[in-house]
Amino acid sequence: MKAVTAAQMRHVEQRAADAGVSQDRLMENAGLAIANAVAEKLGNPWWKRVVVLVGPGNNGGDGLVAARHLAGMGARVECMVILPRKRPDAHRDMAVAAGVKVLEFADCGGPAGLLASLQQSDIIIDAVFGTGQNRLLGEPVIGALRAARHAGRPIVAVDLPTGVESDTGSFDPNGLPADVTLMLGLPKLGPVLRPVEARLGDVSVLDIGLPAGVDAGINVEWLTPKIAKSLLPGRPGNAHKGTFGRVLIIAGSRSYVGAALLATRAATRSGAGLVELATPQSVWRAAAGRIEEAIYLPLAEGPSGEIDPVRSAQQALRAANEASALLIGPGLGQGRPTSEFATAFLASKPESLPSVLDADALNILASGYRWWERVAGSAVLTPHPGEMGRLLGTTTALVQGDRLVAATTAAKKFNKIIVLKGAATVIASTDGDVRISPWVNSGLAKAGTGDVLAGLISGLLAQMPSDSFGAASLGVYIHGLAGDIVRRSRGESGMTAGDVAAALPDAFLALSADTVDAVVRTT
């Protein structure tokens, strides 16, 4: 599902009009879809009291249409027009004819009068600005929204909460946070990239009847269950383990044994046929047998106990020749022998071997001059914002300031797939296409969850070696879904990376069985 700026959405609507679907038709479709969604939230709209805050533009028109349909369902609906609307106003007139009470905010006693009305309601619909807001809020809107915040009733936002800027996701402190946001037609780019700041609540994207193809040329997608399911590798019944590929994982050091184990455990749960963990001999002694399904390659160490760069590179290259996909980096360390090993190995690995470069592999590469020219072939880079800053030679703050630009810039510069981790993870391809994860979960902001993600992507890459962008996108989606499953059963504070790895089979099952919504609502 494409994610759009406000200008792109206007272009989409113009294309729809050119295809014979008018603005009025889209508004009618939107209003009915909003009414149905609100009715579902109410359980039974009959005799429930609904107050709609109406703005001067199309968002207010959507609210008036929704009010009319809710009145037709038996709800008692009142529309409060916060800013004057142009006359004549057919949507207002039809709402009044359907029994909707339409009042002017200026005539209702100000914020105090509105608050009294809102406190009598069962639900409040925010249809003030939506994507039409492009400036800071002023009076009388601020007073009306303050009353709505203080009313203590559920807030349903039409398209966007009033106060959210469509293209950046920034939230005006005088805005109205939503409990539910009903985006119309297509997701809006800014809030998709910054869902926490945008104060969206639970998000649904409503079908408003846009004709197929009107979003052509837009290169940013919001990852949906439908997109993710389309990326699942096939599982033919007559397959053998070689069918599903062999993953080589180079990971771990004395201080970070767990990173190697978490990545390996995730790879074994990805559907890959075989997973091999190549790890320094001292780590191998602690790790061997902890994951029964994996095979192990102890890498040679020198007299000091650190990895032997030459002998270990030779061992890893022999293993790489048998592999379908590679992961290197989790917990590997950045000491001089390790850096020499990783640099030599990556410069010599088979060009045809699709790879995932994570954690310490990224930090080692970031210190090398034009390193991307010496790492041949397809690769997925999985940096967190700090690692992204080091790779690009900038700061974490600048990366976080525009995550979309950071990811797309890196993908183009390095000619690698970029997975920029964080709330609403960004996956950027080398040809300009971008996918954005729908998952926001502070429980994933913990040590080890990145190792799980890297291991999962490498296992998927072994099964779909010609589609690194697809493997990265599916890995991000499944990882986020698994995290959401754990969050709903254990909470964000108590969940661990190991819990996320253990939930990967449930996430795959939910996606393949089309039960994602049911799982995340009931688990």
Image (tube, grey):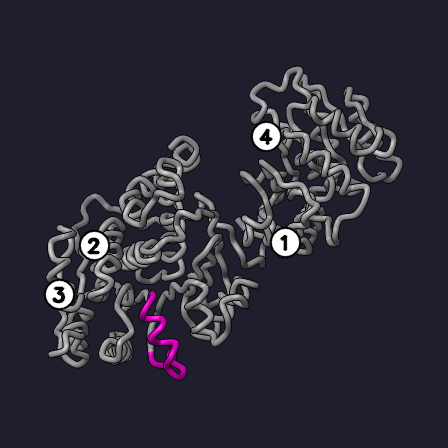
The reply to whether discs 4 and 3 touch (Cβ–Cβ < 8 Å) is no
Indicate which disc, 2 or 3, sits on the residue closer to the N terminus. 2
Frontmost of labels 1 and 2 is 1
Disc assigned to residue 170: 1
Horizontally, residue 134 falls left or right of residue 278, namely: right
> Residue flagged by tag 4: what amino acid is it?
Ala
Q: Quadrant of residue 262?
A: bottom left
In front here: 22 or 387?
Answer: 387
Indicate which disc, 1 or 3, sits on the residue closer to the N terminus. 1
Frontmost of labels 4 and 1 is 1
Whether residue 262 is visible, yes or no, is yes
Horizontally, residue 315 falls left or right of residue 4, namely: left
The magenta-colored residue range is 358-374
Quadrant, the C terminus: top left
Q: Is residue 275 magenta?
A: no
Counting from the top left corner in percent of width and height, residue 485 is at 37, 39
Frontmost of labels 4 and 3 is 3
The residues tagged by marks 1 and 2 sit, at their Cα atoms, a distance apart of 47 Å
Horizontally, residue 195 falls left or right of residue 159, namely: left
Q: Secondary structure at mark 2?
A: helix
The residues tagged by marks 2 and 3 sit, at their Cα atoms, a distance apart of 22 Å
The residues tagged by marks 2 and 4 sit, at their Cα atoms, a distance apart of 44 Å
The residues tagged by marks 4 and 3 sit, at their Cα atoms, a distance apart of 55 Å
Q: Quadrant of residue 209?
A: top right
Frontmost of labels 2 and 4 is 4
The reply to whether discs 2 and 3 touch (Cβ–Cβ < 8 Å) is no
